[in-house]
Image (spheres, grey):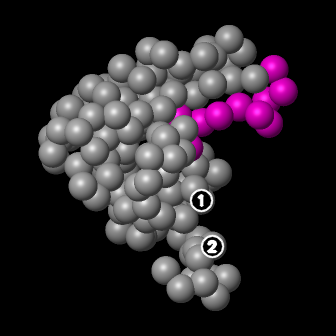
Amino acid sequence: MSDDPEPDIDALLEAARDAAENAYVPYSEYAVGAAIETANGSVYVGCNVENANFSNTLHAEGVAVAEAVADGHREFARLVVSAAARDGVTPCGRCRQTLAEFCAEDFPVYCDTGDGLREYALGELLPDTITPGTLGVEE
């Protein structure tokens, strides 16, 4: 975690790339890192952690969100995702749903293409998602 106020997008990209270097990926060899910025400018990172029982694998985005939530954060500003392959990977469906628990449809998700970042809105990646409001819970 970093307490630097409002890191620029390049700093978030670097944090995501650094996190990918720590990924534990003996099965897929596909390292992913993520850096999520909270509403107050703190940054949390995550990397994927594979497991021989693939359903127990932790995804970088989910790890970053969990770290932030464990530290008391519930509001987020943006996310950067980077794979070692620099192929523009987007969060998977499970991670998109995790983000939707805390983030609005216009939440920016940046994906590392190697030559820059491609920006998506969360709602573009996961339209008509299940939210707390869907279940009648006030947000």
Tag of residue 97: 1
Q: Residue at x 37, y 62 (%)?
A: 75
Amino acid marked by disc 1? Gln
Q: Residue at x 48, y 64 (%)?
A: 102
Q: Nearer the viewer, residue 5 or 121?
A: 5
Q: What SS does tag 2 mark?
A: loop
Q: Position of residue 112 (x, y in %)?
A: 35, 34
**Relative vertical location of residue 139 with respect to residue 116 in this rendering, above or below:** below
Residue 68 visible at all: yes
Q: What SS does tag 1 mark?
A: helix
Q: Position of residue 71 (x, y in %)?
A: 44, 46
Q: Is residue 78 left or right of residue 60?
A: left
The segment highlighted magenta reads: 52-62
Q: Is residue 126 left or right of residue 130?
A: left
| Of the image marks 2 and 1, the number of the one nearer the N terminus | 1
Q: Residue at x 49, y 51 (%)?
A: 69
Amino acid marked by disc 2? Ile
Q: Nearer the viewer, residue 45 or 4?
A: 4
**Relative vertical location of residue 4 with respect to residue 30 in this rendering, above or below:** below
Residue 90 visible at all: no
Please identify the quadrant where the N terminus is shown.
top left
**Relative vertical location of residue 83 with respect to residue 70 in this rendering, above or below:** above
Q: Quadrant of residue 87?
A: top left
Q: Which residue is disc 2 drawn over?
A: 130
| Residue at far top of view | 26
Q: Position of residue 116 (x, y in %)?
A: 24, 34
Q: Are marks 2 and 1 in contact (CB under 8 Å)?
A: yes
Q: Position of residue 11 (x, y in %)?
A: 20, 32
Residue 122 falls inside the magenta stretch? no
